[in-house]
Image (tube, rainbow, N blue to C red):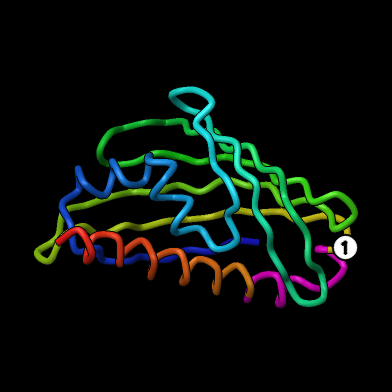
Amino acid sequence: MEMQGEFTLPAGREAVWTALNDPEVLMRCIPGCESIERVSDTQFDAQMSAKIGPVKAKFATAIEMSELNPPASYTLSGQGKGGAAGFAKGAARVSLSEVENGTQLTYEVDMQVGGKLAQIGSRLVAGAARKLADQFFAAFSAEFERAA
């Protein structure tokens, strides 16, 4: 499954880059995130709960950052294991560019799911993923509005 999008955030590129790498900010913004911990300069471990259609599960997720080009871009790769619910794994390419009203964040995601998640259908999974992305970016944007 592939997904892409872009959002304009009301902050400078450096501030957006810093927030994207701050576990506390990410925990407040990622829907269903119960914990997130920086393991190294390029790795995070997270615990998340998600409900996609009839499937609800807790996921232990490992995230690795690569192709780092601060504060312009990076690639996030990860895998979440949800026990009987299945798994999700994939990569996201994130780019930041300065625009008149702040910073434009562009992302491209390629993701695979397995187990019960794969059985419920790609359209339902894609719709849920889009909804989660929209919720994340709304909360992430609010972080900058609150700071201003």
**Quick check: 37 above or below 19?**
above
Q: Residue at x 71, y 43 (%)?
A: 60
Residue 50 is situated, as x and y percent measured from the top left of the image, at 69, 63
Q: Element at badge 1?
A: helix
Q: Quadrant of residue 22?
A: top left
In the displayed orientation, state which residue is furthest to the top: 40
Q: Quadrant of residue 14?
A: top left
Residue 119 among magenta residues: yes
**Quick check: 96 above or below 64?**
below
Q: Residue at x 71, y 54 (%)?
A: 112
Name the quarter where the C terminus is drawn. Answer: bottom left
Q: Residue at x 79, y 51 (%)?
A: 82
Which residue is the site of mark 1? 116
Residue 41 is situated, as x and y percent measured from the top left of the image, at 43, 24
Q: What segment carries the magenta color?
A: 117-127
Residue 38 is situated, as x and y percent measured from the top left of the image, at 49, 31
Compared across the picture, whether 21 is left or right of 45 comes to: left
